[in-house]
Amino acid sequence: GLARLERSAKERMGIYDLEHMMPHNLINSKLISSVIRDFFGRSQLSQFMDQTNPLAEITHKRRLSALGPGGLSRERAGFEVRDVHHSHYGRICPIETPEGPNIGLIASLSTHARVNEYGFIETPYRKVEDGRVTDKIEFLSADLEDQFIIAQANAKLDKNNSFAESKVSCRHKGDFPLTSPKEIDCMDVSPKQLVSIATSLIPFLEHDDANRALMGSNMKRQAVPLLITEAPLVGTGMEYRTAKDSGAVVVAKDEGKVTSVQADEIVVSGHKYSLRKFRRSNASTCINQRPIVTLGEKIKKGQVIADGAATDHGELALGRNVLVAFMPWRGYNFEDAILINERLVSSDVYTSVHLEEFEIESRDTRLGKEEITRDMPNVSEEALKDLGEDGIIRVGAEVGPGDILVGKVTPKSETELSPEEKLLRAIFGEKAGDVRDASLVVPPGVEGVVTEIKVFSRKGQESKSKETRAKEFKEIEGIKEVYGSQIKQIEEDKIFKLSNLLVGQELSTSLLDAESGAVLVARGKTIKKSDLSKISRADIDSIKLENPGQTEEAIKRVCRLMDEQIEELRYEEDREIDKIKRGDELPPGVLKRVKVLVAHKRKISVGDKMSGRHGNKGIIAKIVHAEDMPYLEDGTPVDIVLNPLGVPSRMNVGQILETHLGWAAKKLGYRIATPVFDGATEAEMKEEMKKANIPSNGKVTLRDGFSGENFDQQVTVGYIYMLKLAHLVDDKIHARSIGPYSLVTQQPLGGKAQFGGQRFGEMEVWALEAYGAAYTLQELLTVKSDDVQGRTRMYESIVKGENALQADTPESFNVLLKEIQSLGLDIRTEKKSEAKEVDSEERL
């Protein structure tokens, strides 16, 4: 791209006279914009940011790919390229990579890794000198690292920072030699430098199988931010740093005192922080920041002052801590299914807010202009009740499937007119019913409240509606207020600074007004505090003192500086106001664009996908009344029941350890950090459980909610951090009666987006054949699919109230015939009566 630009610039340098050459003669701006547009619009590596939650965002920004221009392709990449290599240590995470065709080709940057100026990944090490570990940090690339012997981060050190043991486990290239301390060159800075951010958030990672850790890392990125956030009881200590670095929270730039706290703004010692309220993310989740500081609180630099989506007091909070029991329950948690307590629904524990955006454009078509209006043909007044006079729905309206969001009419072409309309046209002239309704309606399965409306139109479009004018006026007033307060602040500062310099000074000449030239303060008069307000209007050059010295220059400097700042603010204010009045830039042919934001609360329901942090995922199979759930001896019902068979074969024992430690943490009233590869030991866990008065094996006797009797076996109970994932059943549920058909095969389209049908595949056909369900099978393969004439006949018979199936040839059979004919084989279908007896000679 840019090489092409360089070439064209060099060619032009040879053509033009160097003395009279200007930059625009050399550089073609269209070429630059096309290169940039190509890179961001068409490049394989320019992707739409995954913004489901803050972790998904930061992970996407730290992604490494072997695909794309100049890289590998999925088909050609072999096993060796995808596999983990010793040079990845501390640079590329060995765990976080997608499942499927991209495995090993797309990776994530490790926690402490950085990319150097040459594009190589480096990782930090502590230098070791004569067996003593220093605090000098050195970043090494993979080829340099091979020259050194490197000790593990958790190798034992004595109080002098020397290695405590005579032989230390080290790394050298791909080997793990036991080395004497004198031969060691470097030491890892942290046990978690091996893994990526998402993986470093899994507690007890060292007890999980790598496959499940991979799933855990990937599923955390799909967690939906919840309405009520809660940080994990058992974390890894990386939650605070991740949330802060992701940009989801608001961080104080300087220390100071909180002087004002509002829902959408925090002021710390004169510095304003604006908060984002109910914004839509790329994944249709809700971004809402809320203050976590109070009035008068002292703030340090770098402190988190407002929470964002999926954060709790500055810590990443993707899910909720729930009381779990590992036990089978009447077969409802068979094959990873999950059983949940109704309390999680009624108390909004797993409720999330989603924002859907709908868009419509009015264009200038060949037949005339489309119009956004309230006046549409054949639409009842009931359907228009929430539309404003400009045809756009009001903010705050509750909408459901089929409701009109924006009314639009578009001109009809001659071919679309029915015979009756043509007659009316002939009698009454052009205007009789020459438009059709092309409104924006709410699609099936979406309901909620309209929270925001954005209207984009060109300048000089049809006269603006009352609502639009009122909105514009409000925006302009808001801008004037913001800039007015800033100018007032500067003028107050100016008077304060001048009072220190001017009060008590005597003027050698009269002080004149900058605009009218009138005398503000007479010559020879001593300046008092009451005269200071006049000085802000004064002509700077007319300030002359009896004893000038440094003061006169300082006064003029203050006045000039402050006046420049005020001038700049006024210019900015005019620009902002002009921007609102000017209208918007729209693509050619588009007259107006309207975007409508619909917010809806999603409570957790049967069919939603949930997961823990250890790759322990499942679907909710049943929501049980609180009184029917298994309960503890003290009467507390459990929140969630998981299948114990999900643990042994999966080898993700981390979830059991988290359950035990989580219960201890809940009872003791504090949260626990157990860092990756350096976490809580069995002895430490037993100690915490003993303190919390929990049985050492973590098992208790539960009672059945139905009968009140004890279960036969003791059950592992505790607190586990469970996430609600973005695979929500409301987004997937879909039904079709009649809808669009494919042009070639005449079969219904597939998928919810196309309003398609369900595919009845080869194996499903075998199932019906096995049952001998001949008629069901026939209608599935003909009238319900691609038998065009049969479909029409079926419609007629239903209208007449008959129940007859008259199947014809499916269209897919005709497609097959045409395919064979295109290969040069003359294949035809003939009716039985027309088929002739073929004699033996013809057969030969």
Image: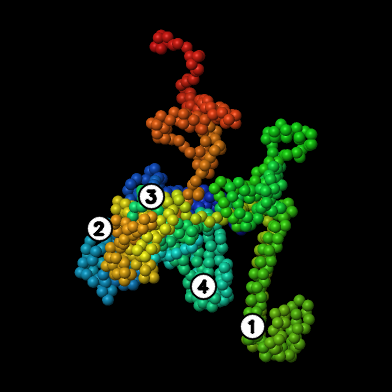
Tell me what residue is drawn at x 41 percent, y 29 percent: 772
Q: Quadrant of residue 800?
A: top right
Of the two numbered discs 1 and 4 on the same chain, state the one appearing first in sequence.
4
Q: For this view, does 151 lie left or right of residue 271?
A: left
**How many discs mark residues in the rendered view?**
4
Q: Disc 3 marks which residue? A: 332
What amino acid does circle 4 point to? Val
Q: From the image, which quarter does the C terminus lie in?
A: top left
Circle 1: is it few (<14), some (14-19), or many (20+) Cα within 10 Å? few
Q: Which residue is mark 4?
A: 293
Q: Nearer the viewer, mark 1 or mark 3?
A: 3
Please tell me whether mark 2 sits on a helix, a strand or a loop: loop
Give the labeled residue for mark 1: 496
Query: What separation in Å lies between label 1 and label 2 (alpha carbons)?
Result: 70 Å
Name the residue type under label 1: Phe
Q: Secondary structure at mark 1?
A: helix
**Which mark's residue is nearer the viewer, 2 or 4?**
4
User: Can you give x and y, in whole percent of width and height, for residue 590 in the image?
Assistant: 66, 48
> Residue placed at 24% from the left, 60% from the top?
176
Question: Residue 473, position in %: x, y?
Answer: 70, 62
Marks 1 and 2, the one that precedes in the sequence: 2
